[in-house]
Image: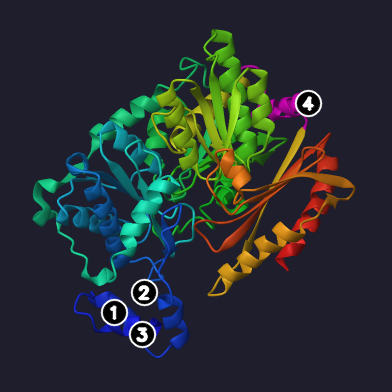
Amino acid sequence: MDYREIFKHWLNSTQIDEDTRNELEAMADNDAEIKERFYKELEFGTGGLRGVIGAGINRINRYIVKKTTQGYAEYIKSRGEDAFRRGVVIAHDNRRFSVEFSKETAGVLAANGIKAYVFDSLRPTPELSFAVRYLGAFGGVVITASHNPPEYNGYKLYDERGCQLVPEVNDLVVAEIAKISDPLTVKSLSFEEAGELITVLGADVDEAYYKAVMGISICPDLKKDIKIVYSPQHGTGNVPVRTVLDRLGYNVIPVIEQCEPDTEFSNTKNPNPETNEAYELAFEYAKKYDADIVITNDPDCDRLGVAVKANGDYVRMTGNQSAAVLQEYILSNRAKSGSIPKNGVMFNTVVTSDLGDRVCAKYGVATEKTLTGFKFIGDKIYKHELAGDKEFVFGYEESYGCLVADFVRDKDAVQASLMLCEAAAFYATEGKTLLDVLNELYKEHGFFLDALDNFMFKGIDGAEKMSALMENLRNKAPKSVNGIDVVRTEDFLSNEMQSKGFPSSNVLKFTLADGSWVAVRPSGTEPKCKFYFSIVAENETEAKKKLSYVREAFEVYCN
């Protein structure tokens, strides 16, 4: 069927709820809108589903959620009776329809005879990862669109290890989803109809998670004479982060206006810790209370942003910077206690700064690179755990996500918030801030300047434009930049990179003779292409100059 026929099928279906029918009727005379919503299906990619909420097969709605869950249910059925019995844990964030999508997910699983565990209210994504392993479940689902604008929602799947699905498993689920031709026919049970097939989770899982997080503390009896301003950006971090910090005696000043769950993110301009707008209100609090640091999470609480008081103002740290400082804090203290494992390993991604690698090397800890996506880090933890050859020490991505202890197999901003506050308190006893520690690392290892530029490619032809951009870079990339040779090009679609253990992925990385590099990849969840820059120089002034001409040499391909 073409897009008009699919639209008519939805409009005339007796399975459509009244609100959806009203939405469809309102667009009946708008062919462009109908085409945008029905010309293709919303793709279940490597990061799951993520899209604008609304009626249509190219939107996220209760019917697309039901179809996706039915496909997942078929995959679970193929895994045998034990998978049925162990069931699936479901969590959700504060977004529009997150509660409804969570209930539909549980209802479809129950209709297939599969046990479902549903939290009684919103929970952070890392707690979902923890709960899967804690309950011995077969898998997990989290309803979230992370830090996207309010009109978005999403759907992510986790395996029994509490790790997002790796590509080979993801492909099996996608194949099952593709077999379902009509999302309007998928059956779902109410909680009343499901009976014992749906269990509502409460405080017992929370307490187990809090205990595990507090257990990562290196110096629990540390003097905590610092003031911390904290914002959960209207999301899931409010209760767990404040609970853990409060129990350990930290002085936390919450940004009250951003603490309540809010589908519209009413009191923040942007809930993404990677943006300046996310900190505006928190900085007002920080100046009012003379705070030492500001921390904030994204709405599903798997990312941590931090800013540090410096010369009467507050300076934001990048994800690369805060992770490097955390590694220095953790490893220097473990070195003192003799607890760094001889076979220790740190994981980060191919688009992550090499500063953290150098910190780890100083303490005898190896580094292994993965593709972007914490599932690859979680998978490496698991494989080394099975082999018994290397012991996890730390994992992180440049995009503000890190993992301190592996009872979670995804990035965990509750853990990161605690460890970052502990590091700030520890260095305060030495008369230093986190920025002072960072500058010490620069003196020791060289100055690193990070930058990330996003280029949006929306609409029907967006994917084609991104494909053309990547092909041009593959075939006509610069051989040198301002006299600095490009000494290595890594194409992660190539057999060469797959032979090195990387899954096939549309990522290009260009390394210059001075150690600087550029990486380019289309987003797996949004209609944009990302340009990552890591510039190595003797000082900040030189690094900024170098960044400007490296940017110019590569971003011209977006025109």
Circle nearer the N terminus (4, 3):
3
Q: Quick one: SS at disc 4?
A: helix
User: Label 3 belongs to which residue?
Assistant: 26
Residue furthest to the bottom in view is 29
The answer to whether the residue labelled 2 contacts the one labelled 1, judged by CB atoms less than 8 Å apart, is yes
Amino acid carrying mark 4 in the image: Lys
The front one of 266 and 373 is 373
Q: Is residue 6 above or below residue 483?
A: below
Q: Report if the CB atoms under discs 4 and 2 are less than 8 Å apart.
A: no
- State the SS at label 1: helix
Q: Is residue 517 left or right of residue 100?
A: right
Spatial separation of the CA atoms under disc 4 and disc 1: 62 Å
Q: CA distance from mark 3 to mark 1?
A: 13 Å
Badge 3 element: helix
Quick one: SS at disc 2?
A: loop
Mark 3 residue type: Ala
Q: Position of residue 352 (x, y in %)?
A: 63, 40
Q: Quadrant of residue 378?
A: top left
Q: Quadrant of the C terminus?
A: bottom right
Choose the circle earlier in sequence order: 3 or 1. Answer: 1
Residue on which disc 1 sits: 10
What residue range appears in magenta? 429-446
On the image, numbered disc 4 is attached to which residue?
443
Report the disc number at residue 477: none
| Prevailing SS of the magenta stretch | helix
Label 4 neighbour load within 10 Å: few <14, some 14-19, many 20+: few
Going from N to C along the chain, the mark reached first, 2 or 1, is: 1
Determine the residue located farthest toward the right in the rendered image: 483
Residue 173 included in the magenta stretch of the image: no
